[in-house]
Image (cartoon, helix red, strand yellow):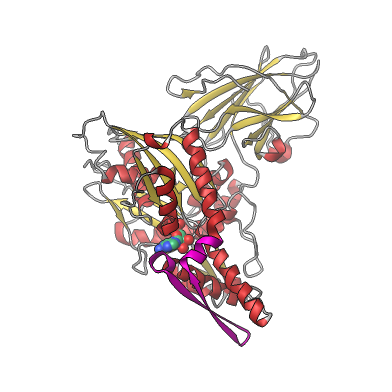
Amino acid sequence: MTAPNKKSKHPAVGIDLGTTYSVIARLDELGRPQTLNNAEGDKITPSVLLFEDGNVVVGKEAAKAAATDADNVAECAKRDLGNQFYHRQIGGRRYPPESLQAWILNKLRVDATRQIGAFSKAVVTVPAYFDEVRRKATMDAGYIAGLEVMDIINEPTAAAVAFGFQQGYMNPDRPDDQRKKILVYDLGGGTFDVTVMEIGGRNFNALATDGDVMLGGKDWDQRLVDFVAEEFIRKFGLDPREEPNSHGRLWRDCEDAKRTLSARAKAQIACDFRGQALRVEVSRSQFHDMTKDLLDRTSFTTRQTLQAAGLEWPDIDRVLLCGGSSRMPAVVEMLRDLSGKEPDCSISPDEAVAHGAALHAGILLAHYDGVSPSFHVRNVNSHSLGVVAMDARTRRPRTAVLIPRNTPLPVVARRVFKTQRVGQKSILVQIVEGESASPDDCSQLGKCSVRDLPAELPAQTPIEVRFRYEENGRLTVTVKVEGTDKALKHEMSRENSLSSEELDSWRKYISGLDPIAPPPPANLSGEAIQLAAGAKAADDALDYAPESEGPPADPNAGTVKRRWV
Ligand code: AMP
């Protein structure tokens, strides 16, 4: 095995920041991933926070408090990333989801520091299907927690890297000619991802990815909670979900019963509320029936991803399971039936993602130290990226895609649009992410505008919009107006994300660390860049250009080869 971090003075740290549980790992002196225990001595830390007497407790004790002090407990904040605030108030306060995620990361950092000494550099994982806004919010959470997030990588990719390590793919003595295609099915507590990867020698290339950021073990729990609550209502006319603490207790017992049903044919769930008590028995087949539609959703997405990779089941060498919810026997059965192969459960569903992240951290640190990497990861983007343009035929806005989903990263793509009118004063570039032709159904990433165009600029003047999309999901947008010196370059700022002042004050508050000055945004011409709130409605949208090619602007970057539609 190689030891990618041997030379670095920094420990190679990887963090799986899960919806329900989080894990931190580092590479040991021999370059092997090792999970670090938290202060309670556990390998996994519940991603749960308890706000109590001005303190924030993260982990097991906070999870226990969900049954007694539910109003002061925050769970599943990962599902709210990208929104301005966590979905409910805690102790009368509204918190941005980034801050809640940061408290979890901060606990992992502080507890790990006790074992490996002070560190700040780390790789954090995100679901492959996370969009730009959620990726940025995750990086911001890392900053608030006092981390220097070297990179964010996709959870299924991290799991595949851990698998590759375990199988000896990173061993330099191993012949490079073996290509294996693996499908990673990752069902966690709050998110579902499926990714098809090709491992060729020491190269890990994602071929296609898809998923659902609102589907995970929590939804299976919810079905049991609802089932027991309905029984309770039928028997006593009372709903135990009405009161937060009894709801929290019921939830905890249902999650427990779900785990029992992975090992046994039946489970008992006790529920008491307002002096009434009920014991409900649930069989595994009953549980399967009440959650079949959820499993079907994952099956549908799995088939779609395989298709998007241009493959069929006989092409797949392994079906790799990860995420705690993949322990459910129904998942294994469904994948066995679908693929005709025995799913591979050889990696630890809880630890593999953090291990893969630590291996990736080792590679980055080695790279900083001038050591050539022992493996290379190439990802694809999970959502199409484009701009809003005016359709000349219908005069309605529509999405003009620059980078279609499942494009290998990094990539540079270019598309030429036209000004709409003679003497147009400004151009508004609205960046969107999603698969719909209607911009309203896509996620709005932000806006920038080119102002003060020369008077009498002819209609149909070409405007080149160029996207550079990095492997870590950072997007740089360049806009050039032909025949003028008007150009702007901007690394995207996202709507709904915290300002740098807010980030700094949260950082001081949560991690106790001082702010680090961020690099100023690159700006080609010194042109004022108006983002989001500043962009006026009077700016003209781009005219939709039906076709234009995107030649490579950077020899090291991939290019989108297809013709635009
Ligand atoms: P992860 O986000 O990968 O840590 O997965 C956490 C999810 O896995 C939670 O929803 C857990 O309830 C679920 N989980 C863990 N162990 C089991 C099990 N034995 N059977 C069913 N679900 C499980």
At a point 34% along the width and 49% down the height, the residue shown is 344
**Image quadrant in which the N terminus is located:** top left
Residue 120 in view here: no
Residue range corresponding to the magenta coloring: 261-290
* Residue 257 against residue 354 in the figure, above or below: below
Closest to the observer, 426 or 344: 344
* Residue 509 against residue 257 in the figure, above or below: above
Q: Hey, which residue is sitting farthest left in the picture?
A: 173
Place of residue 323 in the rendered image (x, y in percent of width and height, measured from the top left)? 42, 54
Closest to the observer, 344 or 405: 344
Left or right: residue 434 compared with residue 207: right
Place of residue 458 in the rendered image (x, y in percent of width and height, measured from the top left)? 77, 12
Place of residue 179 in the rendered image (x, y in percent of width and height, measured from the top left)? 31, 32
Left or right: residue 285 compared with residue 431: left
At a point 25% along the width and 30% down the height, the residue shown is 176
Closest to the observer, 406 or 117: 406
Toward which corner of the image does residue 118 lie, by quadrant?
bottom left
Place of residue 54 in the rendered image (x, y in percent of width and height, measured from the top left)? 56, 71
Left or right: residue 485 compared with residue 280: right
281 in the magenta segment: yes
* Residue 335 against residue 463 in the figure, above or below: below
At a point 37% along the width and 69% down the height, the residue shown is 40
* Residue 52 against residue 184 in the figure, above or below: below
**Image quadrant in which the C terminus is located:** top right
Closest to the observer, 401 or 94: 401
Residue 519 in view here: yes
Q: How many marks?
A: 0
Determine the quadrant in which ligand 1 lies.
bottom left
